[in-house]
Image (cartoon, helix red, strand yellow):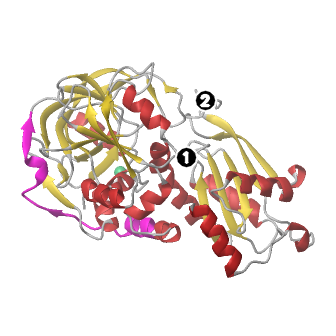
Amino acid sequence: MSLRKFLRQMELEKQVLHVKDDVSTRFELSYMMKSFDNRGAILLFEKVKGYNTKVVANVCGSRNRIYTALAASQNEFYKKLTEAWHFPKKPKIVRNSAVKEVFENDLSKIPILTHFEKDAGPYITSAVVHAKSLDGNVENVSIHRLQVLDKKHLAIRLVPRHLFKLWQAAKNAGKDLDVSISIGVHPAIMLAASSPVPFGVSEFEVANALMNEKLHLIECEHVNACAPAEAELVLEGRISIEKEVDEGPFVDITGTYDIVRKQPVVEIVGVMHRKDYFYQALLPSGAEHKLLMGLPHEVLIWEAVSKVVPKVHAVNLSIGGSGWLHAVVSIEKQLDGDGKNALLAAFAAHPSLKHAVVVDSDIDVFDASDVEWAVATRFQANEDLIIINNVRGSTLDSSADQETGLTTKMGLDATRPFAKPKEKFERAKIPTNKHVEALVNKLCSL
Ligand code: MN
């Protein structure tokens, strides 16, 4: 399963907008991506100023498109993802692959975007990085931003997680860390690489489980790492254990600038790609960024809240909350107080969560007005509000204490109180029939 096959499917579903005019990689592409953010369409830039390569953007830019890529409905999606986390499947390694059609040796022909005004320069934002431990027992796949330093070097942002751990181990052994950097892969691989599975679980195996065992990998030519055989473009590199540079400034998920840090340098030792490859662009702080980071954490919240209330209907880490800081959870409660337990479970499942609202199952968690209506008619601040002071939150939140990471969390139980009469909380309905429904549909399709 490849990105291009998915794009063909999306083309048939009329979800691809073709941009046939010349567009520059410096601000023009990102401006257009931003303009179409939240409107759903995939953008295919056919003419990029100064390059012969097409650029595809906003591939995972809508929730429904990610569900479609996994051939799952919203409810199946939660189950499918947890199953893949718990039962990863080893992908097959193959020899031949279209990504080996062209070999180059530097980054100069790749249309890498410069996104925002104060960015340090062009950045690769959609790359899936694979590395192995020196003994080969542990593999890791994760998405990292990569700043272009020159034709052969990138700075890599290593958050202290799994790839950082592999790099630290390499450092202790005195060896640079081999990595493959794959760009233009199927959404299932992007989602697997964003999944919070424990150290030691290979996210390629998670992706393979999500793809019904259709993920094939190739061994790289110059480094000890693997890459998806159907990737559009693969860079081979080594993360230096000595060279560090200033990385940033660059925009993070909330749309504000992250601080500049010393980060390691990747030396590029090989570039391979399909003859007619697409370069995949991903806008930092765009809907796609929020969905890829948020969706796997919705699943964590769904699992945790499911343990404390009879049924969870849906979870939304909302786009307005940057896909990270705000959650709405709809539940079926059995007793008063269940709503607050649901809030506590949600906070425990996703430590970055700052504000959470719990609603009944008749509220659409994806409709902000509906959620507001629940807060307006079912919530009393003196009874239904919980505030937790001085807890660890996300440093991505500019209002949190940037040094200690401490923040204040707020939970709103906007479920209907059982102690009060049910009828007072029911939404009035209008009786309907086939005739009026057909009339509405006809008018809507005009
Ligand atoms: Mn990992």
Pick the residue in front: 259 or 212: 212
Considering only order in the chain, which callout, 2 or 1, is on the residue closer to the N terminus?
Answer: 1
Position of the C terminus, as image quadrant, is bottom right
Q: Position of residue 219 (x, y in %)?
A: 12, 52
Q: Position of residue 334 (x, y in %)?
A: 76, 75
Instruction: State the residue at coordinates (16%, 31%).
Output: 268
Left or right: where 169 falls relative to 259 = left
According to the picture, the residue beneath numbered tag 1 turns out to be 323
Q: How busy is the neighbourhood of tag 1: few (under 14 within 10 Å), some, or many (20 plus)?
A: many
Kindly identify the amino acid type of the residue bearing the numbered disc 2.
Ser
Q: Tell me how far mark 1 sits from mark 2, CA to CA.
A: 15 Å
Whether residue 285 is visible here, answered yes or no, is no
The image shows residue 165, relative to residue 68, as above or below, that is above
Left or right: where 333 falls relative to 382 = left
* Residue span colored magenta: 80-104
Q: Secondary structure at mark 1?
A: loop
Task: Answer whether residue 99 is magenta in the image.
Answer: yes
Pick the residue in front: 199 or 314: 314
Instruction: State the residue at coordinates (66%, 36%).
Output: 407
According to the picture, the residue beneath numbered tag 2 turns out to be 398
The image shows residue 39, relative to residue 51, as above or below, that is below
Discs 1/2, front: 1
The image shows residue 345, relative to residue 385, as above or below, that is below
Q: Secondary structure at mark 2?
A: loop
Q: Quadrant of residue 343?
A: bottom right
Kindly identify the amino acid type of the residue bearing the numbered disc 1.
Gly
